[in-house]
Amino acid sequence: MAETADEMTLNELMRRMRGIIAPATGEREAAAISREIMFDLKGWDLTQLAIRDKEPVSGFIAGKALDAARRVAAGEPVQYIFGSAPFYGMRFKVTHATLIPRPETAGLVDLIVGRYGTRKDLRVLDIGTGSGCIAIALRRFLPFPEVTAVDISEAALDVARENAKALKAPVRFIREDILTAAPGTEQFDIIVSNPPYIAEHEREAMERNVLDHEPATALFVPDNDPLRFYRAILRYADAALTPGGAVYFEINPLYAADLRRLAATLGYRDPEILPDSEGRQRFAVVTRQ
């Protein structure tokens, strides 16, 4: 339960939140999280925060904001505290059954929308949909696509269905384990996936707020089989892709070269490996021979 706090100006509240959060995240991230807290509590964007800078904030709201700041400082992601996260200009419900959407994944959507933004009636399959963020963004920003999304987690699919309804994005959701799934007769122009790709040995370098709160099954793969999901998806795609279709992956930069070899072994063209905004090898486009 949030504590109450004495009335203070918005400027003072923002400064106190940054002071609480910064030792855990650094100043820049603390400022961003403080803004996110106020958006979640009051719906105030950057413009509203600037306009209201010297206005008083009620003790009730200040108490909730400071309580959230302390939870963030203790390692809890702000997105799980309030149950929502921004992605591609929309707000998505998130729970501990789903990953928090990240900017890198928005880059994957950018790549697809940039290449297919004028093509109508595309058939799209999102594998490992989680919160549904990729599937819903593509349904909203491609012209009249038919989008299907699958996930092994029924809890994640429940969240994805809620997001699709709230964002008015008709997407078909199916529970399926891609590691054992056999393709049916349906074919797709685009298969997209941000599968688990973090090797177990990378755990020790990861932040505690990710390890302690986000679903491990959506993050990690064994050290001895880091391309487990890519192999399964490419084998599935061999029968499920239309002629000229492509698979769009978010990837672990550590295994870009291994993915090239895997694609060649399975009869695909040499993947197109593309960087994210930080210059890291983050996306792969795999097409059939």
Image (cartoon, rainbow, N blue to C red):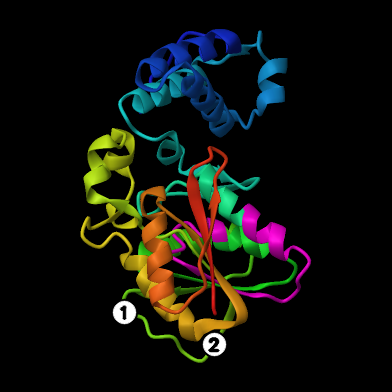
Looking at the rendered structure, the kind of residue marked 1 is: Thr
Q: Nearer the viewer, residue 282 or 58?
A: 282
User: Is residue 287 one of those drawn in magenta?
Assistant: no
Identity of the residue furthest to the right in this view: 118
Left or right: where 105 falls relative to 216: right
Element type at marker 1?
Answer: loop
User: How far across and down, in percent of the image, does residue 108 sit?
Assistant: 57, 54
The reply to whether discs 2 and 1 touch (Cβ–Cβ < 8 Å) is: no
Q: Which residue is mark 1?
A: 180
Magenta segment: 110-134
Name the quadrant containing residue 137. Answer: bottom right
User: Is residue 128 one of those drawn in magenta?
Assistant: yes
Q: Quadrant of the C terminus?
A: bottom right
Q: Nearer the viewer, residue 214 or 28?
A: 28
Q: Marks 2 and 1, Cα distance to the nearest angstrom?
A: 17 Å
User: Which residue shows up at 42% across the image and 80% down it?
Assistant: 236
Name the quadrant containing residue 182. Answer: bottom left
User: Which residue shows up at 45% across the image and 43% down it?
Assistant: 83
Position of residue 204 relative to residue 266, above or below, is above
Left or right: where 202 falls relative to 57: left
Q: Is residue 219 visible?
A: no
Q: Quadrant of the N terminus?
A: top left
Within 10 angstroms of label 2, few (less than 14), some, or many (20 or more) residues? Answer: few
The numbered disc on residue 1 is none
Looking at the rendered structure, the kind of residue marked 2 is: Glu
Q: Which residue is mark 2?
A: 186
User: How far across and down, in percent of the image, does residue 196 sit?
Assistant: 35, 57
User: Which residue shows up at 45% across the image and 24% down it?
Assistant: 64
Within 10 angstroms of label 1, few (less than 14), some, or many (20 or more) residues? Answer: few
User: How far across and down, in percent of the image, does residue 214 sit?
Assistant: 33, 46
Say whether disc 2 or disc 1 marks the residue closer to the N-terminus. Answer: 1
